[in-house]
Amino acid sequence: MNCDELKLILLDYVDREKNPDLCEEFKAHNKICPDCFNKYRFEVGLRDLFRNKVKAEPVSEEFIIEVKAQLKKLQSGTALEEIG
């Protein structure tokens, strides 16, 4: 893996959304490339900062049902109606 290839999967790796083989290549590259390792550390730190500072607020079941209904309409080509 080279720096350009690593950049393409950096955020997926940080979010743990890549397959194990790519993860091993990613780790190996980071061990020999300080620039990529620093980019990785920055992204992990930023993600952790957001997770610790941004608190998710619960949403009502009614809201979830309405969002799902609107998504179905969008998938079927029906125009989006005002959510209210």
Image (tube, rainbow, N blue to C red):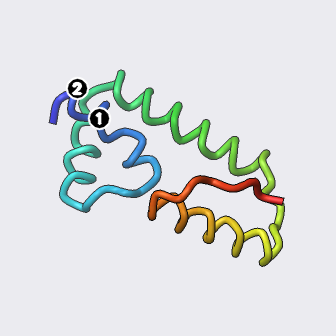
Q: Is residue 69 above or below residue 54?
A: below
Q: CA distance from mark 2 to mark 1?
A: 7 Å
Most foreground residue, 15 or 40: 15
Q: Is residue 7 above or below residue 14?
A: above
Residue pushed farthest front?
78
Q: Amino acid at mark 2?
A: Asp
Q: Is residue 23 left or right of residue 40?
A: left
Most foreground residue, 61 or 3: 61
Q: In x, y percent, where is residue 27?
A: 28, 45
Q: Would you name the residue on which mark 2 appears?
A: 4
Quadrant that contains the N terminus: top left
Quadrant of residue 82 in the image?
A: bottom right
Q: Circle 1: is it few (<14), some (14-19), or many (20+) Cα within 10 Å?
A: few
Q: Would you name the residue on which mark 1 appears?
A: 8
Secondary structure of the residue carrying tag 2 is helix
Residue under the image location 43 percent in, 28 percent down: 39
Q: Are marks 2 and 1 in contact (CB under 8 Å)?
A: yes
Say how many tags the image has.
2
Residue pushed farthest left?
1
Q: In x, y percent, where is residue 77?
A: 46, 57
Q: Specify the label residue 58 is tagged with.
A: none
Q: In x, y percent, where is residue 41?
A: 49, 35
Quadrant that contains the C terminus: bottom right
